[in-house]
Amino acid sequence: MDGSDSSPRFAGGDDDAEADPVWKSRPASPAVTAGSQTGMAPESPAGTGTLGGHLKTFPFEENGRRIDVDTGPVFFNTHASPNFESLLDYLGIQTSEGGLGFGFSQGNRIFQWGSSLLKDVFFRPGAFCNLETWQTIFDIVRFKYLADDALASEVEDLGFLPSVRDYLAEESYSHSFCENYLVPLLSTLWKTNAAKCLPSFPVKSLVRFLHDHGILSTSGQTPEWYKIQGGAQELIKAMTREVPAHRIHLRARVVNIERGSTKGAFSLCTSDGQSHSFDHIIFAVDGEEVLDICGSLLDVQEADIISELRTSKTVGVLHSDPSLMPNDTQRWSACNYITNPCPGFKSSRPQACLTIWANDIHNIPSSTFGDVFITLNPFTPPHPRLVQGVWEYTSPELSASALNAQRELPTIQNIKGLSYCGSWTGCNFYEETVTNGLKVAVDHLGAELPFQLLDHQRQELVYTASAFASGAFSSLKNMVMRMVLRLVGFYICVGRILLRLLGLISVVRFAAGSSSHAKALKSA
């Protein structure tokens, strides 16, 4: 393992092994540590023997028939995934359009959302008779037109920006809007329970994120979602097609990394007792693992930044138990955010999980295989007889401190010949994972890509600084809609205040009447 071969050597295996192709690099001997405690990829710190990380496939069997099911469906939004789309085009991977509908369910309360807000309402029986539905729809429209105001803040430290909780309260958004729409939407996109992180998440970052994905578009055009034909295995095969087999080391846990005997060299020690020499190491593992593996190799600044990029464990279950789906089978969505209608007394947070309807996502025929579901972090386990696979992986913990750490990460990149990339350096999206990996390949290893790499961070700064100055949100239609929505919102607030005052007056009158009646009875 000397420095004469410039092909990358995969030493690990997380969801980010697919993010580090090097088509043409300077002479070097880089090691790509792409493993995690989930153990789903090459020469992994967990020591398991498969590539792909989150891109894992489980067999599902029913009545003697078998089909492979992706545990993490590869969906991407063309509006927000230019680099990922360019990569797929270069690799010759075929994609197909696939709608990404989502919904909220709590017992018999079901809210189903798709690509069109009007269709969601007009094709839902009884929707117009439900005041909660009207309130939610009004807030969705209001948020699309007015949320841009949050981008006007010039504060750089995200920790000092208003949180989503503060913003929604200040603007008098309904609880129904947050619970029935915003949380399910973000849980579907982030593949985690957004109710845990959303309240403290900076609203400016949220609005920018939703804009990037075209979700706040007021033009009537909805973002198009695509999926990989043939599933995740097609992507894994294409990504490793030109990587020599002897450069991929499986079932070799990375124990620690030390300075080598020569200047600029590192010794990578594996669980089988071997030590390998490299002059550059790329970490595509979680931040916690980076700290464990590197130890004293990192200085205080490096350790502080990486320690803020925390991850949390997610448990996934492949099953056929419909108890973790909405009660009404006619209103199942591709992704279903399910809350427990009967949470335990000791639960301080709402119990919720995300169930993906694999029949809809992967076009699996129900007549042949029955119902096929993937549930992330189920609040109650599916029936054991209906479970066909259980796995665990990590997802980034989204917070203001994590977003600030992501901004600071470039200051420690490649300072000592150590580079960092992967989903944990972003919001768990394929676009971020691919972009971060390719930036490391280009900036740190001198790779030349067969397509243009878009720098999202630079685009973000330009977009935020110039959006209002250019009048991007100031068309006549938008100005009129914003004025009308603010006026309606004002009257709704006034109406709420009047209703509360009337309720208070009624209580006072009732109390006074009861007191007079009691005195009359006493005097009698």
Image (cartoon, rainbow, N blue to C red):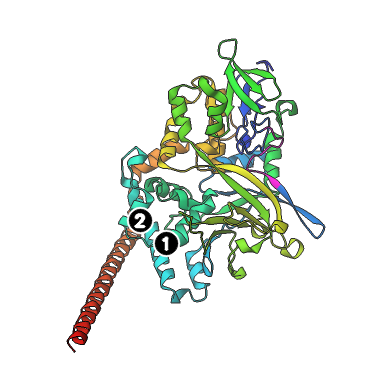
Residue 318 versus residue 301 in the image, above or below: below
Residue 95: x and y in percent read 65, 49
Residue 503: x and y in percent read 27, 74
Residue under pointer 2: 168
The amino acid pointed to by label 2 is Leu
* Crowd rating for badge 1 (residues with CA inside 10 Å; few <14, some 14–19, many 20+): many
Residue 156 versus residue 79 in the image, above or below: above
In this rendered view, identify the residue nearer to me: 29 or 118.
Answer: 29
> Which residue is painted at 43% across and 42% down in the image?
399
Quarter-of-image position of residue 12: top right
Residue under pointer 1: 177
Contact check, label 1 and label 2, Cβ < 8 Å: yes
> Which residue is painted at 58% across and 62% down in the image?
333
Residue 280 versus residue 326 in the image, above or below: above
Instruction: Specify the farthest residue to the top.
Output: 262
Give me the disc on residue 431. none
Residue 50 among those drawn in magenta? yes
The answer, for residue 113, to whether it is visible in the render is no
In the image, taking residue 30 as reference, residue 370 lies left or right, namely right
Q: CA distance from mark 1 to mark 2?
A: 9 Å
